[in-house]
Image (spheres, helix red, strand yellow):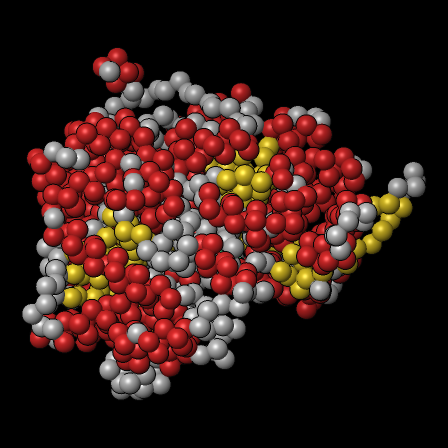
Amino acid sequence: PAEKAEEKPVFDKELFKRSILYNVMNMYRKNLEEATPQQIFQAASYSIKDRVIGNWMNTQKAYEKEDPKMVYYMSMEFLMGRALGNNMINLEAYQGAKEVLEELGLDINVIEDQEPDAALGNGGLGRLAACFLDSLATLGYPAYGCGIRYRYGMFKQEIRDGFQVEVPDNWLAEGNPFELRRPEYAKVVKFGGHVSVRCDENGRNHFVQEGYQAVRAIPYDLPIVGYGNGIVNTLRIWDAESMGGFQLDSFDKGDYSKAVEQENLARNLVDVLYPNDNHYAGKELRLKQQYFFISASVQEAVEKYMRKHDDIHRFPEKVTFQLNDTHPTVAIPELMRILLDEYNLGWDEAWDITTRTCAYTNHTIMAEALEKWPIDLFSRLLPRIYQIVEEINRRFVQQIEEKYAHVYNVNVQEKIRKMAILYDGQVKMAHMAIVAGYSVNGVARLHTEILKSEELRDFYEMFPERFNNKTNGITQRRFLLHGNPLLAQWVTEKVGDSWITDLPQISGLKKLADDAEAQKEFMEIKYQNKLRLAKYIKEHNDIEVDPNSIFDVQVKRLHEYKRQLMNILHVMHLYNELKAHPDMEFFPRTFIFGAKAAAGYRNAKLTIKLINTVADVVNNDASIKGKIKVVFIENYNVSNAEIIFAAADVSEQISTASKEASGTGNMKFMLNGAITLGTLDGANVEIVEEVGRENAFIFGLSSNEVIHFENNGGYDPMQIFNTDADIRKVVNQLIDGTYSADKELFRPLYNSLLNTLSTNRADTYFILKDFKSYAEAQKKVEAAYRDRSGWAKSAILNVACSGKFTSDRTIQQYVDEIWHLDKVTLQQNG
Ligand code: 26Q
């Protein structure tokens, strides 16, 4: 509508152009011709930051004035990716900026490529946090992201001789143009020492931590720009600095070695993100990181609240903490500590406030990902926090006893063993998060149901009203509008641009799914995107891929439950088939992988080596005439993901059913018109429900079948190995020298499939069990692709039915059903 367009400040291209030229001169004493692409990126970013700052101030002023309830999204990870392109997109300035840069003889993609990814996260959980911030700002909800400013984010992956090598990611080397250091909001965080009890004149006990080491937490703010609404929220990430000047607790004055230790604490604290995805490692430094950013964030939230209010009891009316998995769970005892020790509240009052403030999201059912801290470590590092956890546990155990002591057929000790927060010398963070939270949510319907019926069954029985589901989502603004401009433009031509902030509008494409012209256009766009990816692959891997082949893609963290091994074993099988029957019908296929493995995860790293080894053999075997190509994309990250999703035909979502809590890559592929080849796991279930089973390729055991096997001691892979010659052949090829002169190299992978000794059960993830069904589904993919029009129809329907999977919908559900926030609207000025 023209009226609305007039109200909106339009992007001033001339101003932007002058600003870039000015910045290049002012920052580097250069004119444009002399500046490097990195310098132009910096200059352009500062120009965009100028556009953002006014909106940022306005938004924060409006929050001050309206005093709305706020959500603090507490997360160890924010996998933001690049900011420049995203900020231009959300300012609705992208097209204008692109034109300005063109007029200056510059390619916007080259400028964007100068920016390192802000990779402050491992994978799904961290990227979800980033999508949520985008949606919160776009929907106009008052929100803070709270996290850590790691000096080194997720490592860069290099492939040398087919092996993964981890290279430090010095993402701040050139400075971060969008961040704002806020020393005036610094906080002190205390570790270690001991707790003394002092009795005041009224006979009240006070608990004081003494002999501690302290660090100063300095916040850096990053702007989170809402799409086209003038809202700018804040991601606040904390850096650690030493207290300086050998300052010590009065108690320890003059203790030189302690002062040195304190210096060292600050130095290492925020050095690096732990690169484990879905795996708990009980490292002391990790617990320090958790308490560090949580203590600083909770202190700030309480102080900010008290600047405007006088009654701490009403804190939950204005503040809610969403805990992104258990990593920030110390927020619970930290808030208790502040209320008890600094505001002198009684236990019950403090507990009431805390339990109305904190809510917990569970992202995994994998047992090895559950955080269980050794009590001795926990209590040594956080002595006062530990006392509070003990009391939370004591009262909870009492509650269990009261509830079950006289219930027929319930063994109370058994309940306590399974549910206590402190047990077996461990602090069980998930138990604390459930006991002290007003909401517990899973991230896809199936996942939430499994939590209720299996892993968290006892807790669900005790607190059924707390459990709820929030199926994940993704932001279409990054993963379609920015990542796939050709398809975005096409969608807008067909259904208008309302999908940008209202993704379900994209269902308007359904009526075109059968339209031959639309199908042709869609396939042409897909082809262009495949060319773009082929070019990327040529540049980075020096492999030629055929853009007319099927692009079959699996990109995600490497984990055994995600079954990249099954995928590559199937490639090996196809290769065997082609070698045995050179003239068989075969539609050319490009198998594309991208995955980082946790640095200490042997089988994951070996799987990367296997993929690269198979790639070497297959890609260089002239006898198969290039019908199969295998590509391992080095350093899979948010930025190259955008290019990969846009170019995919087939989306591999093949986790062992019940293991993938949700997945979010599956949604990004769907939005970009790739067809899912997957198990009924995580959000795949809901994807298929939206698009129809006929528009996906579903295979494999159901989650119920997997759970049933697991509860009955697994299954016997030897039986499959002995009876299926195709499977036997590829499994044997792991150790017969086909892919490695060193026959022992892949032995651990072989053993993981067949050998009971290597793990608790052989083939823990049912790879051999699902192999046949997977291979059959792959045959159906090939047949379907031969029908170009049928394929186009299915792919278009995937785009058209992706509306549910926007993070805007997810966030609206968090707001309506958990947080209860009010929208803030702004007077926009130019
Ligand atoms: C824990 C302790 C110590 C060190 C590291 C960790 C750690 C770090 C990261 C544990 C887990 C993670 C990440 C988990 C994760 O990404 N889970 C994914 O979350 C997505 C968003 O909800 C889901 O879509 C995925 O299914 C789920 O695997």
| Residue situated in front as seen by the camera: 235 or 259 | 235
Name the side, left or right, on which 623 lies relative to 128: left
Measured along the vertical axis of the image, is residue 373 above or below residue 665?
A: below
Name the side, left or right, on which 394 lies relative to 782: right
Which quadrant would the N terminus be assigned to in this image? top left
Seen at 79% across and 40% down, the residue is 347
Seen at 77% across and 54% down, the residue is 412
- Quadrant of residue 494 in the image? top left
Seen at 73% across and 39% down, the residue is 351
| Residue situated in front as seen by the camera: 594 or 293 | 594
Name the side, left or right, on which 5 lies relative to 368: left
Image spot of residue 601 (x, y percent): 44, 70
Q: Residue furthest top?
A: 3
Image spot of residue 238 (x, y percent): 52, 48
- Quadrant of residue 70 in the image? top right
Image spot of residue 543 (x, y percent): 15, 66
Seen at 17% across and 56% down, the residue is 782
In this rendering, does residue 215 appear at all? Answer: yes
Image spot of residue 346 (x, y percent): 80, 38
Which quadrant would the C terminus be assigned to in this image? top left
- Quadrant of residue 482 in the image? top left
